Each structure stands twice: as C-alpha cells, then as structure tokens.
Image (cartoon, rainbow, N blue to C red):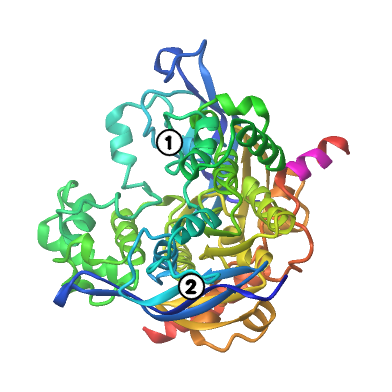
Amino acid sequence: MNGDVLLRVEGLSKRFGHGRHAYQALEDVGFEVRQGEILGLVGESGSGKSTIIRCLVGLEKESSGSIRYDGIDPARPKRGELDRYRREVQMVFQDPYSSLDPRMTVRQIVEEPMLVMGGFSDRERRARIDELMDIVGLHPEHLDRYPRHFSGGQRQRIAIVRALVVGPRVLLCDEPVSALDVSVQAQVLNLLKDMQRQLDLTVLFVSHDLAVVKYLCSRIVVLNKGVIAESGTVAEIYEHPEDPYTRALLEAVPVPDPAQERARRAVRLEKLAAAS
Amino acid sequence: MPAPALLSIERLTVRVPEKERIGGGDGDLTLVEDLTLQIRAGERVALVGESGSGKSITARAILRLDPHLTLGGSIDWDGRELIGAPHHVLRGIRGAEISMIFQDPMTALNPVLTIGEQVAEPLLVRGVSKKEAYRRAAEMLDRLRVPKAKERLRAYPGQFSGGMRQRVVMAAALIAQPRLLIADEPTTALDVRVQEQVLDILEEQSRELNLAVLFITHDLAIVAGLAQSVAVMFRGRLVEQQPVDDLFAHPQHPYTRGLIGSVPRLDADPGVRLKTVADYLKEGSAA
C-alpha cells in the first residue's frame, strides 16, 4: 500500500569531534519516507545528506535522535530485528569504482549478501541472481568477470543487483549517478525508476542535482548545513520554493539554452561589477 | 573576414605507442584521430565529450603534457608549430602564452606552499622581483574577486574552500598574461552555486583580457552560456562543431542530440521517460 510511513527519522543530530573542534553535521533533522515513494534528499557538499544515510545503515552512530523502520528501532533492536532491518534496508553507493571489490567476480559480489544473511539455498541464490541480472540488462556470462571489465554504468548496475538480491523493501542511494557519464546516467535513472515500480521499493535518493531529483522523486527534503531548509512535494518545491536557500540552488542550475544562460550571466556580472 | 586563428589544430592524431601500452596489446593505440579545430583570439570554445572520448588528451597534447604519446598532424600556435617543437620553446609557451587549469583545485595546489608563492611563481621563474611578483599576485586575486587578496597571500590552500581554491589556480594561470587558457573540467568538483561563480569570473576575465578559452567538459549545459562555439568529441573523433546557438537548436550528430536530450531538465515533465544516448544513436543509424 502506498502512503504508510515505512521509515521515520526524528530529531537526528550528529556531531563529529569534541570541544572546540566539534562539528555539527546534523541538527534536529526529521522526515518520513512512505511506502512505495522515492524521497529526494537534496543539498550541497557539507549539507549532511550523506551523514543521514550513513546513520541509517549504521556506518555512523547518531549523537541523538531516533530512527524507526517498520516498528524496529535499530539502536535498540529486539531479537532478530537487526537481521531483518539489515536485510530490508539496502544501500547503493556513489562510486561504483570503489564500492566493488576488484578481486571478486561479479557472481561472488552479488552472491555475498545472500551468504551473509543465510537462508538461501544454492538454487534460490542462482535463480535470484539470474533474474536480477536480466532485469538490469546484464548477461549471465558477465557473472564470471571482474569489476574492471565493466564501465561505470555497468558497475552501478552490478551494485544495484547486489543491493536487491536479498529482497529489500528500502533502497538508500547516495548520489548513485553523479560519478557516471551522461550517456549512462539516463540508463541508471530509468532503471531505478523501473525497479522501484516493479519491486514496489521505497527509495531514499540523495543527490546534489536538482534536475535528477525532479525526474525521479515524488517528495523532496532540502538540507542546508545540517538543518532541513524545507520539504514538500516536487510540485511545491520546484514551483513555489519558500526557502531562500532552495531558490538559490534552483537558480544556479544551468539550463541547456544558450540565450537564457547568457542573459542570466549578464545580470549576475552586472551585479558583481556594481558591488565592487 | 574572420580574424585569423590563434591556435590552429589540423588533423591531429594522438597515439599510445605499442611499447607504452598498459597491459600490452598489439600495435599503437589511437586515442585521437584526425581532429581539426581553430580558436581565435578572445574566443571561447567548448570541447565536449565523455570519459574516454579524447577531449582531455587533445587539450594536453597542445602543451605536450604527455610526452610518451605520439602526436601526428599539426598544432599551429600563432604561427609556430608546436608538434616537434624543442623543450625550451614549449617551456616558454606553457604558463606564459598558454595556461591550463584542472578539475580538482586541491590537487592542483601544493598544500605546503602559501597562496602567494603559488600565484606569483609563474612570474618569479621568469625573473620578476619578489616584491613586484607578489604585488601582481594580490592584484590578480583581487581581479578574481578573492576577498582581502593581499592578506590571503600568506594563507595556505587548506584554509580555502573549493571555489576559492579554483580562483587561486586561475590567478596563477592568468598572472603571466597568457592569450589562451585551457580549462579542463574546472568546475566539476564544485557545488552548483560555486560553479556558477567560478564560470562568471572566467567569462568576465575572458572578456576583459581578450583571453581565448578552450573549455573541456562533459556537461553541455554549463557551456551553453559561456562558449561561442562548441565542438563535440565521441570515441576519439570530432563529430561536430557549431556556433553555440546552432548546436543547441540543430544538433547534427545523433550523439550530440543524445548528450543534450538524455540529461534531466528542470523545465521537463518528469513523467516523460528520459531517452538515453544509446536510444539517440540507434535512431541516428536507423535514419
């Protein structure tokens, strides 16, 4: 069913370091991810968007605040809950050149999560891998090759298969297309869109690219220096941005239209000249 | 009549000789094939392509930054042939007549040298006095709108943000008053708002100093407002070059159409499925 809250983040704060050198990466961040939606988490470098994802998968420990997933509190799990959480919430990293072990074959890479989780027979493992490889457009003979034999877009598809083999309900994607060439970006975006529908996935999609987020997401959370600037539906944020930070981000997105870009630059350069 | 070209590249080929090939392989490996491109004084030309297309290799060939590669054809710089030119000639041109800036402003700067030392260096190595070189370094940083330029000469790169670092790199590149700046993805590592500022300053300097710019990028949208002419590379070849307005209005090559069409746009309907570059190439070969 669409609309039930599946993942809830409340009052999340994260501080790195101590005393004078402390850095507040996140401050009282709260949002909900609903079953079956793609939620975009947008901000510049340093906004804290990756830290949120890292807290969600346990790569960082939050300083305060809570995470709730379908009745589970991963910080205080009851028996068996952590296993379920780790199976149902999977992640795709930004850089498919560093997120795949170069010494493992593709089969070893995509099989590993099932071996770690346990409970999958040989036949099941093979069937799941074959099915997902087919869905993402990779061939069975690719399974015996190593990551170096693949392009960035193919590697990211391998990373997506690895995330999906254990049958997650939630996919956390940290800038999954920003390291890819334009020509494969569209492929991976379309793939994510298709997978989300086919498998009824819930996706938290972290990106600095507002155009990509608009294409993919239904709702958006805008982060500015560790604090939520605003959140809303795509229509709300893109048509009526309330926060000056959101407006500034939207205005800085270059558009592939020479006349429009030249006019915008002329206005900015005039302002610059007037200011000095 | 159009002004004569400042830089004229004719039928350039760049090859990796067989003995230099990593991982072996038979024969020379061709990276760039039959590339012809002109840049006039003060003109801003974008060279657009994806990783592996040969765009950076072409830019680096102009200054011969990869000495192990074999160059063919001709690179004429203001009446002088650069291919086969002796090292002292190239040294005289690098940084003084043609400068280059790179993608990552952190690795382009030396972390243990002050900003002043690095911006002034192109003048110091040419015998300008320290006092004069530092005065001009401060002036150049000020031109590039680095706040409190004079005080910042004593700072270190680690104290600067990414956008400020790229301005420092630009200041070092422009201080010896080159006539051509080669900019290889200079804003790819930056946030959109910082990218916009750096590009604004780049264009401003290009206009004020009559500086020609060869702008290398994979992102067509960012050169839409900056370049006067756009050249597109695909698999080591130039597939088309047009004035910027014509290129966006009537892209000729299916690959160019793909580069423009496959990028999500803010003004597009998200319900319409994105066509991939592969889709455009397929349509192109069918037509």
Q: Is most of the magenta stretch helix, strand or loop?
A: helix
Q: Is residue B137 left or right of residue B26?
A: left
Q: Amino acid at mark 2?
A: Arg
Tell if the residue under mark 1 belongs to the same chain as the one under mark 2. yes
Is residue A174 visible to the viewer in this orientation of the structure? no
Q: Is residue B47 magenta?
A: no
In this orientation, which residue lies closer to the viewer: B180 or B81? B180
Give me the C-alpha separation between circle 1 and circle 2: 31 Å
Q: Chain of mark 2?
A: A
In this orientation, which residue lies closer to the viewer: B120 or A68? A68
Q: Nearer the viewer, mark 1 or mark 2?
A: 2
B133 up-or-down from A234: above or below: above
Q: Residues within 10 Å of mark 2 (few under 14, many from 20)?
A: some
* Disc number placed over residue A101 in the picture, else none: 1
- Residue A59 falls in image quadrant: bottom left
> What residue would you read off at disc 2?
A68
Q: Which residue is found at the position 43% from the left and 68% from the top?
A: A52
Q: Residues within 10 Å of mark 1 (few under 14, many from 20)?
A: some
Q: Which residue is found at the position 31% from the left and 46% from the top?
A: B95
Residue span colored magenta: B278-283
Image spot of residue A75 (x, y percent): 38, 68
Q: Secondary structure at mark 1?
A: loop
Q: Chain of mark 1?
A: A
Is residue A7 visible to the viewer in this orientation of the structure? yes
Q: Is residue A194 left or right of residue B71?
A: right
